[in-house]
Amino acid sequence: MSTTTPLPDTDGPTRIVHGACPHDCPDTCALKVTVQGAPGAERVVHVQGWAEHETTHGALCTKVSRYAERTHHPERVLHPLKRVGPKGSGQFERITWDQALREIATRLSAIAARDPQAVLPYSYAGTMGMIQGESMAARFFHRLGASRLDRTICASAGGAALALTYGGKLGMRVQQFAHARLILIWGSNSIASNLHFWTYAQQAKRAGAKLVCIDPRRTETADKCHQHIALRPGSDGALALALMHELIVHDRLDHDYIARHVQAGPDGWDGLRERALQWPPERAAAVCGIDADVIRALAQDYASTRPAAIRLNYGMQRVRGGGNAVRLIALLPCLTGAWREAAGGLLLSSSGSYAAVRDDAALQRPDLLAGRQPRTVNMSTIGADLLRPASPDFGPRIEAVIVYNSNPVAVAPQSPEVVAGFRREDLCTVVLEHFLTDTADHADYVLPATTQLEHLDVHTSYGHTDVLINEPAIAPLGEALPNTEIFRRLAAAMGYDEPCFRDSDEQLARAAFKAPIDLDTLRRDGWQRLPLPDAPFADGGFPTPDGRARISAPALGWGLPDHVAPWESAASDPALAARYPLAMISPPARHFLNSSFVNVKSLRDIEAEPVVEIHPDDAAARGLVDGTVVRVHNDRGSYHATARLSTRARPGVVNGLGIWWRKLGLRGTNVNEVTHQRLTDMGQAPCFYDVLVEVEPA
Ligand SMILES: Nc1nc2c(c(=O)[nH]1)N[C@H]1C(S)=C(S)[C@@H](COP(=O)(O)OP(=O)(O)OC[C@H]3O[C@@H](n4cnc5c(=O)[nH]c(N)nc54)[C@H](O)[C@@H]3O)O[C@H]1N2
Ligand SMILES: Nc1nc2c(c(=O)[nH]1)N[C@H]1C(S)=C(S)[C@@H](COP(=O)(O)OP(=O)(O)OC[C@H]3O[C@@H](n4cnc5c(=O)[nH]c(N)nc54)[C@H](O)[C@@H]3O)O[C@H]1N2
Ligand code: SF4
Ligand SMILES: [Mo]
């Protein structure tokens, strides 16, 4: 954790600007941005946390403390570029904005005249801002009638599970973890990816709480917990069922809470009770690769400690059974009545807390579809879909992709197919970016986008419940433009004359929220807190149709939750497991944020090189020593990394830390060479941590 960066030795008065961290991180920190220099030549000299923002209390992670280095990076793309070399070569010439917009509009118009669904937007959470995310961009694609994008790459399995079980992406207030007596940190490396939650967990620890980490990898977070349960990837559902088994047989249930607030009957608690009784600890222990006594003790702790809180994170739902596992875990605090206390319950995502104040329709204007129902393409299968021919099922072949706020060539699963798709000579690819990423290298046109320090935005969070403003700190560098302005100009070049394409960023920011959130208060104070109860489900009141926590919904096609074995495991495919005996997970490297920051040298120097952690016994069996460059491979492809012999990897599981830019990794590859495009049980999400591989010296 770092709160200061040295001030460079420049003169002149300074100015402080209210900012918000735009990154895909649950913390959404308030930033205090210090600007110096004459108007027109201002530089950001300092990015700090804003100490008065209670939730993030002035502390930033190392990555964003270096944000000035990222914005003023010498390799920023600062004017439009047009491809001159072969597809994917990254060879470009500088062109004017006028030429870029005219040529792109001509190509898109020609495609749209045949079928606008052949145009696909591709975006995710490069910025989480509501304005530079899906506002003007969504209006543009709605007006065009382009294919819609199902944004599943991160969180949709767990999101669907929470929506089914609780009625929304809702949970404990993060501040409350400070008062818990037991915290299960389940599938989350909080020190790396949820720093401010970790601060609250530390407060609880100092006050005597027990911290248990449930994660196949012995992370830096696991090191600092009292107990680490290193289960096999994709076995969390089995663990949750065995915990229920123990709660039932030792009668540690809160019968009153269940009777009043949990779905009853054969589709509800009666059915689940019967199912859980089929999961004695020994059965789950065999699935999870842990000791049955560990499960018994965990159940005992969970039942006897109050308040008991669970911090789930998305790491554990990137497997085939991710949705079912989240449903089962989300029911645990309903069975013990942990929800009765403000510091008990569970938090996976708080993003549903904003449902009443966000006005996404005002920003995105779905009415511009004018009754059309374009097809939806799943972003997680972009590799397969770019290669798919036209068909009655799929519709037209994808002829143009417009990428913003994402780097699919590095982050999407099964990169051999993703790369082949983006290499199609006939595909028109436009990428709005800060840098020549792996994806931008495949563009026909690269359009220079502003960073968070150069544009206006407003932010909600998925880890806390505040709304923040980000004021532009400096003018756009070079010829860079905010995403909104790029889509405004593209709309004009396409001849769209609806007044909504002339809304300014300030008008958009004003339209983004309903009372009590409003732009003037945000401008004055920097942030606003949602008025929410401290203990959301103390008296039930889940926002499900009948107000009860939901165990199944047969009418929606969801039966009782169950353990679902991974796609790639000895249990589901013994022949595959014989050839590729190691399970691989690819969690984030601490100093990168997905593939962002890989090109920031001071951060890349800390990570040094792409690493695959392997248990010393697995390494010895393969003749590997620490530092061997290895080839990690399966039938889909292979990537190169440096082997780190470490008990951070459990036997049988290797940890390929992500997500390197391919061109900055070893031999132009990264970990997604070996991942696949099969989807989770709910939410159509990718199974990044459900992969079998073999490792050998390169
Ligand atoms: N520094 C940093 N912070 C980040 C990110 C980053 O890339 N770097 N990414 C951001 C993003 S996009 C997100 S979605 C959020 C949340 O991001 P997450 O992807 O949830 O990140 P982690 O907290 O690292 O959690 C992943 C953890 O889950 C563990 N895990 C893997 N498979 C399983 C399993 O089957 N069961 C269990 N129990 N655990 C498993 C991994 O070992 C790892 O420690 O964090 C954000 N914050
Ligand atoms: N193997 C493996 N793969 C994974 C994961 C994993 O754990 N393992 N994690 C997955 C997860 S959880 C996620 S969320 C995805 C994340 O995947 P992405 O959402 O693609 O995230 P990033 O890699 O950070 O890329 C974001 C890009 O947006 C750009 N950007 C940022 N702000 C702006 C802006 O204002 N305008 C424009 N035009 N561009 C901007 C950045 O420069 C950056 O290149 O990756 C997934 N891929
Ligand atoms: S990446 Fe997360 S922890 Fe780091 S500054 Fe941004 S919101 Fe805060
Ligand atoms: Mo994510």
Image (tube, rainbow, N blue to C red):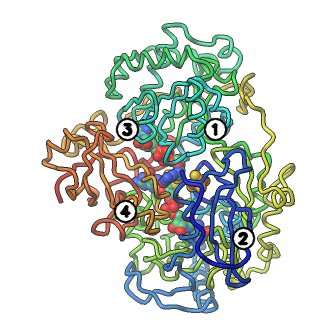
Judge whether 227 appears above or below 602 on screen.
Answer: above
Name the amino acid type tagged 3.
Answer: Arg
The numbered mark, 1 or 3, whose residue comes first in the sequence reads 1
Q: Is residue 581 left or right of residue 337?
A: left
Q: How far apart are marks 3 and 4 (CA)?
A: 27 Å
Q: Which mark is residue 472?
A: 2
Label 2, residues with CA under 10 Å away: few <14, some 14-19, many ≥20: some
Q: Quick one: quadrant of the C terminus?
A: bottom left
Q: Which mark is residue 218?
A: 3
Question: x, y (%) of residue 136?
Answer: 71, 69
The numbered mark, 2 or 3, whose residue comes first in the sequence reads 3
Please tell me whether mark 4 sits on a helix, a strand or a loop: helix
Q: Nearer the viewer, residue 32 or 211?
A: 32
Query: Residue, x 78% and y 44% (percent of image)?
Result: 530
Label 4, residues with CA under 10 Å away: few <14, some 14-19, many ≥20: many
The numbered mark, 4 or 2, whose residue comes first in the sequence reads 4
The numbered mark, 1 or 2, whose residue comes first in the sequence reads 1
Q: In this view, does 546 lie to the left or right of 426?
A: right
Question: x, y (%) of residue 390?
Answer: 46, 68
Residue that numbered label 1 is attached to? 163
Judge whether 316 appears above or below 537 on screen.
Answer: below
Q: Which of 575 and 585 is in front in this view?
A: 585
Query: Residue, x 56% and y 25% (percent of image)?
Result: 209
Q: How far apart are marks 1 and 2 (CA)?
A: 35 Å
Query: Comparing marks 4 and 2, which lies closer to the viewer?
Result: 2
Q: Are marks 1 and 3 in contact (CB under 8 Å)?
A: no
The numbered mark, 1 or 4, whose residue comes first in the sequence reads 1
Name the amino acid type tagged 4.
Answer: Ser
Name the amino acid type tagged 1.
Answer: Ala
Residue that numbered label 4 is attached to? 415
The numbered mark, 3 or 4, whose residue comes first in the sequence reads 3
Q: Are marks 2 and 3 in contact (CB under 8 Å)?
A: no
